[in-house]
């Protein structure tokens, strides 16, 4: 009887651990790489050569990350930043509206997944803060393209890390 009870306890515990694992979501947030700044009138610039190199470098940085989803805003610079990583993972880039961050549909779509999100100097920290549920991060300096925010959520815990990945 003791052995049966012990075995039952182990099985229930392992099922509980498995349920907890499936509710773990990890977000990797980056800002787009260096953009062309020569034409001040364009609202949708491409990446510079340095930016294209940084975008390729992100795919190397993320080589061992098994992304389930890749999101980008629908701008040339963010799409070009996300493309090398998305291609290396055989994933299609999905678009999000930076004015509707971390809504219920997005939460359901990403739950239990590992997700790359490419945004902008002002939207990325806001998105991270929404996931955290607190105002922790300020806008990114316009010359900074190296921030990597990693946020992991579960039903019981939210953790975050900010790394600088220089090109």
Image (cartoon, helix red, strand yellow):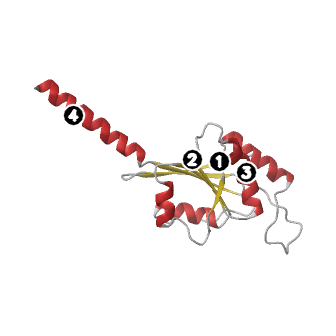
Residue positioned most to the right: 38
Task: Give x and y (percent) for residue 161.
Answer: 54, 50
Q: Residues within 10 Å of mark 3 (few under 14, many from 20)?
A: many
Residue 83 marker: 3
User: Is there a contact, CB below 8 Å, between mark 2 and mark 1?
Assistant: yes
> Which of label 1 and label 3 is nearer to you?
1
Q: Which residue is mark 1?
A: 91
- Residue extending farthest bottom: 41
Q: Are marks 1 and 3 in contact (CB under 8 Å)?
A: no
**Marks 3 and 2, the one that precedes in the sequence:** 2
The answer to whether mark 3 and mark 2 are in CB contact below 8 A is no
Picture residue at 35% right of the left edge, 44% below the top? 19
Q: Earlier in the sequence, mark 4 or mark 3?
A: 4
Give the spatial CA distance, label 1 vs label 3: 9 Å
Name the residue tied to disc 2.
68
Q: Which residue is mark 4?
A: 9
Location of residue 9 with respect to 147 vertically, above or below: above
């Amino acid at each position: 009887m003791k052995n049966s009870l012990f075995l039952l306890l182990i099985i229930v515990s392992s099922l509980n651990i498995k349920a907890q694992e499936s509710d773990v979501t990890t977000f990797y947030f980056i800002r787009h790489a260096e953009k062309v700044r020569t034409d001040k009138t364009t609202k949708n610039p491409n990446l510079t050569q340095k930016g294209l190199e940084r975008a390729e470098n992100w795919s190397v940085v993320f080589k061992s990350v098994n992304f389930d989803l890749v999101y980008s805003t629908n701008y040339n610079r963010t799409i070009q930043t996300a493309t090398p990583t998305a291609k290396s993972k055989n994933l299609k880039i999905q678009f999000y509206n930076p004015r509707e961050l971390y809504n219920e549909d997005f939460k359901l779509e990403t739950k239990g997944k590992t997700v790359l999100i490419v945004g902008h100097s002002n939207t990325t920290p806001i998105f991270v803060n929404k996931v955290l549920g607190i105002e922790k991060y300020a806008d990114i300096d316009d010359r900074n393209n190296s921030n990597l925010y990693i946020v992991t959520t579960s039903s019981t815990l939210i953790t975050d890390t900010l790394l600088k990945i220089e090109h």
